[in-house]
Image (cartoon, rainbow, N blue to C red):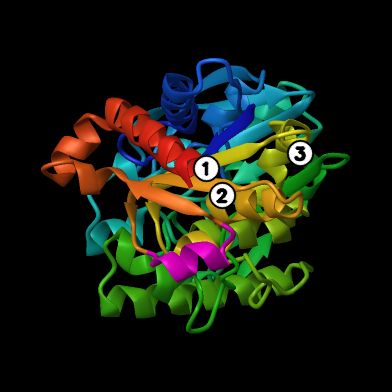
């Protein structure tokens, strides 16, 4: 029997690579002679680099300014001539304690330094993942690090952070365009939110970063001013582009300043990790992630894996930290059965601290139940 194991990360507990190892061990506990093919996946959010590293990429370490200027140790991955950069490594929310002040001050300057380092190293193709950031600056800090000049109505430089961005009236993108000449840039994201509007970066993601109602309003106005300045600089309008609001609007900055296109992070990663090849001849697929919920059905890894397996009539099972979908929703997503770690642990804290053995146990139990049907 050929079993493909293709989970996303279990946030706060296991990387996708570790989760695949645990599930694979559980499969072998029940089917010791099975051919288990591990294909850890990601959807363009946090943890994407770990998956690419496991796929054969080379890690490049760089020290850059974090979201509040304090230096952080970041890194990116080089794979087949392309630099894969995860915004959260430089300006991730894990680097700060979310608060209204932080929501206004956090910036993406360090992301720009990561991009610059990759360019200086000879990269001619870039893929930027944009999930899990602390910032809502529309990618302005990133472009400033690459040479963009932001000015207010008096011609004075505009400072870093989404809170300061409301003063911007003009931006010179020519230094960025010159530096990116001949470079292909792509944004990998798992969301489709635009930059502006009720579903935009500030109202949807700002509260997660510490913004209260006043800060959300201020950030939304600032992103509006930024969008106008980008158009004035000759960029194509980005306000309503699906996905432009990802990463606090980093995607918008990348589209306007780097000439990037937006791609499905999941589609990009699964092709790099060989999921399609692995599915050929598979008898069973097991996927999973930390929380299997309604968001999982909208572009997240488990739903994507189930769709690909379903197209080949391969049954799919799922193991997750918790499952917030009923049986009908799971079936509708193409998942024949699932088990949640939290249902077999005395507490959430216990489940997180013992995720690996629990995942192995529940994967084994899930396979046994599937075989007995």
Q: Which residue is mark 2?
A: 301
Tell me: residue 220, above or below residue 243: below
| Left or right position of 137 against 251 | left
What's the magenta region? 325-334
| Left or right position of 101 against 27 | left
Q: Which residue is mark 3?
A: 276
Residue at 68% across / 48% down in the picture?
309
Spatial CA distance of label 3 from label 2 is: 14 Å
Instruction: Judge by depth and name the residue closer to the eye, 188 or 225.
Output: 188
Spatial CA distance of label 1 from label 2 is: 8 Å
Instruction: Judge by depth and name the residue closer to the eye, 326 or 61.
Output: 326
Answer whether labels 1 and 2 touch (C-beta < 8 Å).
Answer: yes
User: Does label 3 or label 2 sit earlier along the sequence?
Assistant: 3
Observer-side mark, 3 or 2, equals: 3
Q: Dot 1: few (<14), some (14–19), or many (≥20) neighbours within 10 Å?
A: many
Q: Which residue is mark 1?
A: 287
User: Does label 1 or label 2 sit earlier along the sequence?
Assistant: 1
Can residue 85 be seen in the rendering of this structure?
yes
Residue 222: x and y, percent?
Answer: 47, 73
């Amino acid at each position: 029997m050929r079993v493909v194991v293709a989970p996303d990360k279990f946030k706060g507990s296991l990387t996708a690579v570790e989760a695949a190892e645990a599930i694979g061990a559980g499969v072998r506990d029940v089917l010791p002679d099975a051919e288990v093919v591990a294909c850890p996946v990601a959807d363009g959010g946090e943890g994407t680099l770990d998956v690419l590293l496991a796929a054969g990429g080379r890690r490049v370490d760089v020290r850059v300014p974090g979201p509040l200027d304090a230096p952080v140790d970041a890194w990116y991955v080089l794979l087949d001539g392309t630099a894969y950069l995860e915004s959260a490594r430089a300006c991730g929310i894990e680097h700060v304690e979310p608060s209204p002040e932080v929501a206004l001050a956090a910036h993406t300057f360090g992301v720009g330094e990561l991009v610059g380092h990759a360019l200086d190293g000879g990269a001619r193709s870039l893929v930027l993942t944009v999930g899990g950031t602390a910032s809502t600056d529309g990618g302005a800090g990133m472009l400033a690090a690459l040479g963009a000049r932001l000015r207010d109505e008096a011609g004075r430089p505009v400072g870093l952070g989404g809170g300061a961005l409301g003063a911007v009236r003009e931006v010179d993108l020519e230094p960025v365009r010159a530096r990116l000449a001949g470079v292909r840039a792509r944004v990998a994201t798992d969301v489709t939110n635009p930059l502006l509007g009720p579903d935009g970066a500030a109202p949807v993601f700002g509260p997660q970063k510490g913004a209260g109602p006043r800060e959300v309003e201020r950030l939304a106005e600032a992103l509006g001013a930024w969008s106008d300045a980008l158009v004035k600089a000759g960029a194509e309008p980005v306000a309503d582009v699906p996905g432009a609001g990802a990463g606090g609007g980093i995607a918008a900055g990348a589209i306007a300043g780097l000439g990037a296109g937006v791609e499905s992070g999941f589609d990009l990663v699964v092709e790099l990790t060989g999921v399609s090849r692995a599915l050929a001849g598979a008898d069973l697929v097991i996927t999973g992630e930390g929380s299997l919920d309604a968001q999982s059905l909208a572009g997240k890894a488990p739903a994507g894996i189930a769709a690909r397996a379903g197209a080949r009539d391969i049954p799919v099972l799922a193991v997750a930290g918790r499952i917030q979908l009923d049986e009908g929703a799971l079936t509708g997503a193409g998942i024949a059965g699932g088990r949640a770690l939290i249902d077999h642990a005395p507490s959430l804290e216990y489940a997180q601290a013992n995720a690996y053995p629990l995942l192995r146990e529940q994967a084994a139990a899930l396979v046994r139940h599937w075989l007995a049907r």
